[in-house]
Image (spheres, helix red, strand yellow):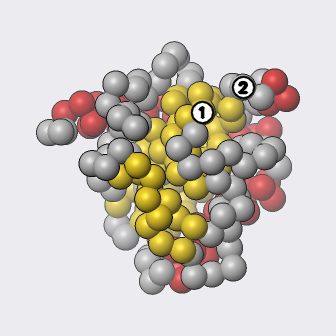
Amino acid sequence: MDLRSLQASPAPGLVNLMVEIPAGSRNKYEYNAEAGLMVLDRVLHSSVRYPFDYGFIPNTLAEDGAPLDALVIMNEPTFAGCLITARPIGILDMVDCGAHDGKLLCVPTADPRQHAIRSIRQIAPNQLEEVAEFFRTYKNLEGRVIEITGWLDAEAVPALLERCIAAAAASPS
């Protein structure tokens, strides 16, 4: 699975999202570009599970040195390696061990029930808090210091996405 030719953003307001971890899992899979495969990185040693499908935007580079992280709200979990065209509706703004580590929150374009969702203001506050608490808990149990500064709405997404696309383009492959 070679992702180098995959556009991060196939159209304005959309991203290609590669699922690494399905919702409900404690297994942390990561894409290994050298092998072109998903690999089991570790099993979370806590009772928390990923609240939504979790992955990354290919051909981006975030401040933490990894591709831009993203979650996608699905009614049913997909699978590691599933490519989803999604609409970002906000960002969980956080700092992980001193590096900015924002996480896009998205909805899939393939789900007509989520077609009208354009903003995190349309998501129940308790669902947003569940996502934030998931990261607080699992990172804390791994001994990592994080700071969640809050949620940013959809208008904050383009600038972050553009920075991460430009950083990947400038990075030696």
Q: In the picture, residue 150 is in which quadrant?
A: bottom right
Q: Amino acid at mark 2?
A: Ala
Which residue position holds label 1?
A: 84
Whether label 2 touches label 1, CB < 8 Å? yes
Whether residue 2 is situated above or below residue 142 in the rendered picture: above
Q: In the picture, residue 168 is in which quadrant?
A: top left
Q: CA distance from mark 2 to mark 1?
A: 8 Å
Which residue position holds label 2?
A: 110
Q: Residue at x 45, y 83 (%)?
A: 143
Q: Residue at x 39, y 56 (%)?
A: 100
Q: Residue at x 44, y 76 (%)?
A: 145
**Image coords of residue 31 (percent x, y):** 41, 51
Is residue 114 or residue 21 the one in the foreground? 21
Q: Is residue 151 left or right of residue 99?
A: right
Q: Residue at x 47, y 24 (%)?
A: 9
Is residue 95 or residue 139 the one in the foreground? 139
Q: Quadrant of the C terminus?
A: top left
